Image (cartoon, rainbow, N blue to C red):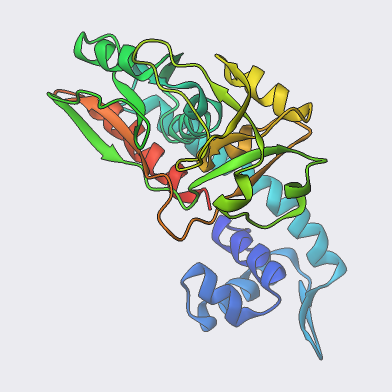
Amino acid sequence: MADLTLTGLRVVVEVARTGSFSAAAHQLGYTQSAVSRQIAASERATGTALFERHARGIRPTTAGEVLIRHAGRVLESVSAAGQELAGLRDRLAGRLTVGGFPAASAVLLPRASARLLRAHPGLQIQLTESATPAQLQALRRGRLEVAVAVTGDGLPDYDFSALRRTELRSGRGLGVAVAEAHPFAGRTWVEPAELAEQPWIVGVRVGDHPEFGTWPGLADAKIAFAVRTWPTRLGLVAAGLGISMVPGFAAGALPSGVRWIPVRDENGGSRHALWAVTGEGSGPAAAAMVRALEVEAASMT
């Protein structure tokens, strides 16, 4: 009797998922006749029909459902084995030190680190959280290999000389964090003029360290609280004591009781740019982290 093959199992699973031979062929990059041959071979190996035709397409037989259930486990195990073997021969190994300011460290850096480690399990990533000036200094001294920095309106003019910058383009711009009971919480977006009468929770500037203030251009904005740390700012927002400006790439880190609402500013509003920064002599592991940051930033829409 013929044996089941991994290719045959993949085809069986894909036909069941898509509901047709033609759709499975398209997803797998095969011809429809190749899919038919794989299904026929799998049916010969099992000695029974795996699919039956109905008016609305193809669906598994009882035997097909049994095979599909086991095939899923087999394919997952084979994939896991491949990843583990790749890690044994992975050239990217050792420690990679990456830094970010608190808002970037909340979501973007953890997601990029997870992506990088899935591809290169031989790496050990050390994350540090500090203000941008400290990160740039650490890059120049060789104590840090990748930093995430933001530039733009209301932020210091950082010195990036002798460093490389790669822009991290995100589909999300700036917005505001509000309590879930706030009138803005159910909105799709707000306009800058609607922010004028709101009490604000802002950051405190310490030396050259950046801060998150009120929305640019607001005259005589009401500052309810000025605090240093990210968790405290969001805690005050959750308590309904004000709203706070939050970049879109950090929106996924908001705690329970807080909503992120984009601000639609047709006049341009606050212009910020997010960067991955490396030293000029950075190695392949740092380059791989920059690519992971680019992918994760682009996925935030």
- Residue at the far bottom: name it: 55
> In the picture shown, does residue 194 fall above or below 151?
below
Give coordinates of residue 57: x percent, y percent: 75, 84
Give coordinates of residue 132: x percent, y percent: 35, 19
**Residue 195: which quarter of the image?**
top right
> In the picture shown, does residue 12 fall above or below 145?
below
Asked whether, in this view, residue 127 is left or right of residue 14, the answer is left
Give coordinates of residue 133: x percent, y percent: 31, 16
Q: Nearer the viewer, residue 90 or 186?
A: 186
Q: How many marks?
A: 0
Quadrant for the N terminus, please.
Answer: bottom right
- Residue at 40%, 37% in the rendered image: 293
- Residue at the far front: name it: 220
Q: Nearer the viewer, residue 204 or 98?
A: 204
- Residue at 70%, 67% in the rendered image: 17
**Residue 45: which quarter of the image?**
bottom right
> In the picture shown, does residue 268 fall above or below 51?
above
Q: Nearer the viewer, residue 10 or 282?
A: 282
- Residue at 47%, 53% in the rendered image: 171
Q: Nearer the viewer, residue 81 or 150?
A: 150
Asked whether, in this view, residue 105 is left or right of residue 4, the answer is left
- Residue at 23%, 34% in the rendered image: 165
Give coordinates of residue 298: x percent, y percent: 44, 49
